[in-house]
Amino acid sequence: MLSMVALSVALVCSPSAERKLVDKIVAVVNDEIITWSELESATKQFMEEGANDEKKQATRKAVLDSMISDKLVAQQMSEANITVGDDEVDRAIKDITRQNNITEAELKQAVEARGMSMSQYREDLKTQLKRLKLVDLKVRSRVQISDAEVKAEYDRMASNEPKEEMVSMRHIFFRWSDGANASERARVMKAANDARARLLKGEDFGVVAKAVSEGPTAANGGDLGEVTTKGLLPELAQAIKNLPIGEISPVIETKNGVHVVRVDGRRTKDAENFAEMRQQIYQRLYTVEVDRQMKVWIDELRTSAAVDVRL
């Protein structure tokens, strides 16, 4: 039964002494109420403009369900006597500014731009920290991620990961200017074909590249090292697609100039080492399982709680 204080939230006397309903209770969670005005306020940010009545009602129900869960969690925080001191909030703010590479003054400016005072922000942050402590107390103890699960996820990722081709190659590059005319293009093409002819006669690729290439790799004999094919210019990637190892490519035209290339090796990129990936995979699985166990725990709270929905 509602107390007189709670009932007074719903009723008010008009000048004519009539009692009119100005708010109503949409849910009772154990001995705490959620009112229509609270629900409408919380729903505003999620309500789509121009939504029909059915959509609006579905949105209200989803928001109310979230508010009930929040009430249950808040009650558990109170029951467990979880507290957060100002020093903990201070440390959290320092962490936030460090992670976002901003000053506390910039954080304050961002908070106030959202229409919130720093004192309100600190209170919200305190509530979040209490919730994290509650999760540690009630939920994290349920989470167990085995090495076998981590390895199975690694194997799944490795099998689904697209196989990436790596190529070792050298190139000789001749540049033409933006909007190059036919005369300039002919000059550049002749230089490229002359260089290619030298290579086909057996001259060392590195020696020719050092002598004539206009690319940034000229000093080291045109050596591009090992690169991924998807990282190459589309024209180069297409030209070397079926080029046998050790053969000299035709002259390849691109937007900025022309290339002559030689592929020295190909391989499929190996998946990242399990030892290097283990912690990252473990953390991701752990986070997912914490979220799942949180939902299970809240469902258990709702089952054992007195929840009366009146929407």
Image (cartoon, rainbow, N blue to C red):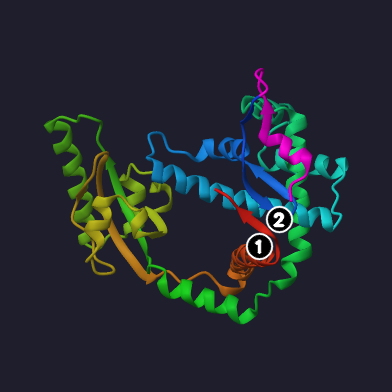
- Inspect the magenta stretch and tell me whether residue 3 lies in it: yes
Frontmost residue, 99 versus 301: 301
Residue 207 at x, y percent in the picture: 35, 54
Mark 2 lies on a secondary structure that is helix
Residue 160 at x, y percent in the picture: 41, 71
For this orientation, the residue located farthest to the left is 182
Which residues lie in the magenta part?
Answer: 1-17
Residue at image coords 25%, 61%: 240
Q: Is residue 145 left or right of residue 174?
A: right
Quarter of the figure with residue 147: bottom right
Say the numbered circle drawn on residue 72: 2
- Please state which amino acid type lies under the numbered disc 1: Arg
Frontmost residue, 81 versus 16: 16
Residue at image coords 28%, 68%: 246
Q: Is residue 228 left or right of residue 74?
A: left
Crowding at dot 2, Cα within 10 Å, few <14 / some 14-19 / many 20+, comes out as many
